[in-house]
Amino acid sequence: MKPLIVDRLKKSYGMKHAVKDISFEVNKQEIFGLIGPDGAGKTTIMRIIVTLLKMDTGSVLFQSKNITDNIRYVRSNIGYMPQRFSLYQDLTVEQNLNFFGDLFGVPKDLQDKRKERLYGFSRLEPFRGRRAGALSGGMKQKLALSCMLMHEPEVIILDEPTFGVDPLSRNELWQILHELSEKGITILISTPYMEEAAECSKIGLIYEGEMLGINTPQEFVDNFTLPLYLLKTQAPHQTFKRLQQTEYMDSIQLFGEGVHLVDEYNLGLSRIQDQLSEYHIDDIVPIQPKLEDVFLNLLSKQRV
């Protein structure tokens, strides 16, 4: 049984189509990532799944139950961590855990056992008496995750949990998520960061409410078979703007170290060098694609 099945989901706000016919499935113990920029529709999808927002059309099955007919069951058995999880700033770490344990109706004796377990994996044990408001951003995210796990949900949904978190805390949070996955918990997570996609078992690339593709991160990269080149130049922004006025406009993307060019028509390096000789490019070298190259290439095809 698949814990989560989303089928042909649609949602609009007035004339704006936020989610356009989205479908995907999440397997047990999987870390499924919804990857895309701000405004792609990731939060809307998650809010629909946890029954905080009504869909226009489509269906969502949680543990084979239609969420529309089983709202209380969904809310009792899914752990949801929104972008801004409401911790009680004046309560200590332990008091926050106690509060959420009470909120979910967890008996006191079980609360104590679960708190010890949560302290173990979150590394918050030394800070159990510290007020939540005095914690760092990374520690607050760990506490929010721990509060969400007090009722031991089998599926957890995390909306951009690493946003605004320092790199060290981000890595620690991902370590925790992998530990949870290994213990049998199914995870649906959203992020705008392409580098985090590699942490997921499977990902869905989303842009403006549309699903561009679903696959494992490695298979996305492996399936990208077009030649890819790095255009080395002293002025990458200027070079990119000039090339946008040429037939290469749909084949180029600006990256930090230069401009990436996809050889859509297999012209070959020599011909590309000849055609771009007037653009003051220092060197053109073949490179291996990254997931961001795949995403941007899929996006360019979507716009055609």
Image (cartoon, grey):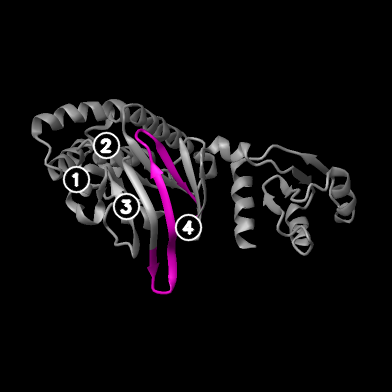
Examine the rendering and report whether any part of residue 135 can be seen.
no
Give the spatial CA distance, label 4 vs label 3. 19 Å
**Is residue 49 shown left or right of residue 74?**
right
Q: Secondary structure at mark 3?
A: strand
Question: Neighbour class for label 4 at 10 Å: few (<14), some, many (≥20)?
Answer: many
Q: Is residue 117 left or right of residue 42?
A: left
> Quadrant location of the N terminus?
top left
Percent across and percent down for residue 179 are: 36, 28
Residue position marked by numbered label 1 in the rendering: 76
Q: Please name the residue shown 26% across and 44% down the image.
A: 78
Tell me the crowding category of disc 3: few under 14, some 14 to 19, or many 20 or more residues within 10 angstroms, Cα based: many
Q: Is residue 69 magenta?
A: no
Label drawn at residue 60: 3
Asked whether the viewer can see residue 219, the reply is yes
Q: CA distance from mark 2 to mark 3?
A: 17 Å
Identify which residue is drawn at 57% across, 37% down. 219
Along the horizontal axis of the image, is 172 left or right of 134? right
Which label lies toward us, 2 or 3? 3
Q: Position of residue 163 (x, y in %)?
A: 43, 47
Q: Is residue 29 magenta?
A: yes
Q: CA distance from mark 2 to mark 4?
A: 27 Å
* Secondary structure at numbered mark 4: loop
Neighbor class of circle 2 (other Cα within 10 Å; few <14, some 14-19, many 20+) is: many
- Label 1 secondary element: helix
Name the residue: 36% across, 33% down.
29
Q: Which residues are magenta?
A: 11-40
Find out whether the residues at labels 4 and 3 contact each other: C-beta distance under 8 Å.
Answer: no
Mark 2: secondary structure = loop
Q: Which residue is mark 4?
A: 40
**C-alpha gap between disc 2 and disc 1:** 10 Å
* Residue 154: assigned label: 2
